[in-house]
Amino acid sequence: MARTVARMAAEILDRDGDDVMLVGIHTRGVPLADRLARALEEATGHDVSVGLLDITLYRDDVGPWRAAHRQPVLKKTVLPESIDDRIIYLVDDVLFTGRTIRAALDTLIDYGRPLAVRLVVLVDRGHRELPIAADVVGRSLETTREEDVQVRLKEIDGEDGIWIGREVANGD
Amino acid sequence: MAIESAAALAGKDVVGISHLEPGEIQLILDTAEELLEVAKRPIKKVPALRGYTVVNLFMEASTRTRFSFEVAEKRLSADTLNFAASSSSVSKGETLFDTARNLMAMAPDFIVIRHPHSGAPHRLANVVPAAIINAGDGINEHPTQALLDAFTMRQRFGSLEGLKVVIAGDIRHSRVARSNAFLLDKMGAEVRFVAPASLLPLEVEELGVTPFVRLEPALEGANVVMMLRIQLERQKRVNFPSMREYFDFFALTPERLELAAENAIVMHPGPMNRGVEIDSGVADGPRSVILDQVTNGVAIRMAILYLLAGGRSEAASDS
């Protein structure tokens, strides 16, 4: 996984240089954004600002017309500086239907007007329900819609790896 | 012993602190913590309650609480209907239940109710499917006020456990004092009620508080000093000789505040009567968190609306 993260950081540098802001989407986007920031800092020697985004209040699967049985726990949104006129990289672990990213875009836009918003994900598993695509992808995986794809990260789960019911790639 | 947050609120309504478990109180406070941030954004609004309708049913005068609920509802994108007793069919003799049934025909998801009769929100909750939030009922409870007070205390001290809280003033007629006493007792704080004997409630022991008839001894080591207004509108007879005399014996003055702990904060649920229960210098002084209480009130009400919105569909699907 360390190699994948390093390659993703290199792609970000290639595309926009190091004047970017990384914004991790809770839960696993947050440590991923930290890892990418460290990789960028190692490559350039410059500090990279990292924010965290909670999309709960913007989700489309909770609401009076949905049968959500309990409200998801709210987490912190922290943007260390203004996002106006910045290039923002949204960071998430798995890209699936695209609905999380739709909510993340709506959340972000309420905080300002970035110059550009790009998307970086560790795993793209396909099956989009919205016209959303990632700019930087760690691994593309062929999956069926029913399969359960899980990214595990040391910071949260105690181990690194990508799982589809079975393990497909472990920490390197 | 830290109190762990519950995963959700158990009931469909919030009608009183006496009905909430400590874990539920913790969940409301934790949720409000995150929602406080919405007020600091460039766009102070989130879509979480889009498509929900809230009726604000205020059968008794209120400015602060009504505005606070309305701001909370709007920040969550709910649609709001305001219903005030004086301008409505209530003044034409309609009963609460007929009013409520008519309102239900418009399919609101929430009814926020303030009512002069103790127990009205509770009875309403039993007859309508909407989530009922008590915004103050008679001399019974004012749960959102107690929650915002607790939130403000937690903000300053990190935890409620072990805090010494003085609540002074017209305790007998105060739903704020009752809700605070229930909440603080559940969360492990120590409560001291101070009032002239004629204004102390009869059930002090049941509430788990220590009564005092003088302010000075109660202030000893206090972390929080909460002053309450004399509610002349609820008093059927005169309970003390004069406002002047009340000030002399029971008002919070800078000299009296010196008796409290060094880190003590001063609270007041409003509206304040300067020069009656509180000296102006104290109300505007560095220890006053009175305006923080107002800011925090919006976050607390947002938290309750947000959390009940989740529980509501569960209750609806069960029935």
Image (cartoon, coloured by chain):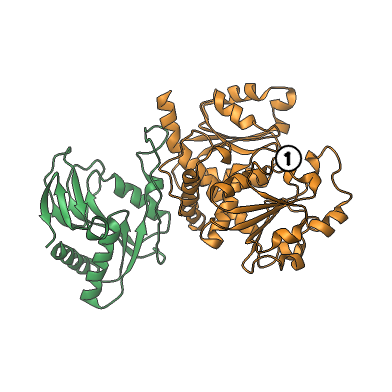
Chain colours: A green, B orange
Instruction: Please indicate whether residue A59 sits to the left or right of residue A12 in the image.
Output: right
Report the residue that reaches farthest toward the front.
Answer: B205
Instruction: Please indicate whether residue B213 sits to the left or right of residue A88 in the image.
Output: right
**In the rendered view, would you say B86 is above or below A31?**
above
**In the rendered view, would you say B142 is above or below B153?**
above
Secondary structure state at the residue bearing disc 1: loop
Give the image location of residue A62, x and y in percent: 38, 38
The subunit carrying tag 1 is B
Give the image location of residue B214, x and y in percent: 77, 56
Amino acid type of the residue tagged 1 in the rendering? Leu
Q: Quadrant of residue B281?
A: bottom right
Report the residue that reaches farthest toward the right.
Answer: B241
Q: Quadrant of residue B176?
A: top right
Count the marks: how many?
Answer: 1
**In the rendered view, would you say A73 is above or below B282?**
above
Q: Toward the viewer: B218 or A159?
A: B218
**In the rendered view, would you say A50 is above or below B314?**
below
The answer to whether one can see residue B247 in this image is: yes
The answer to whether one can see residue B45 in this image is: no
Q: Which residue is drawn at 51% across and 58% down?
A: B159
Q: Toward the viewer: B172 or B46?
A: B172
The C terminus of chain B lies in quadrant: top left
Give the image location of residue A95, x and y in percent: 22, 49
Q: Toward the viewer: B178 or B59?
A: B178
Report the residue that reaches farthest toward the bottom.
Answer: A45
Give the image location of residue A168, x and y in percent: 10, 51
Q: Which residue is drawn at 14% across and 55% down?
A: A139
Mark 1, other Cα within 10 Å: few <14 / some 14–19 / many ≥20: few
Q: Residue at x 39, y 38 (%)?
A: A70
Instruction: Please indicate whether residue B294 sits to the left or right of residue A13 in the image.
Output: right
Q: Circle 1 sits on which residue? A: B202
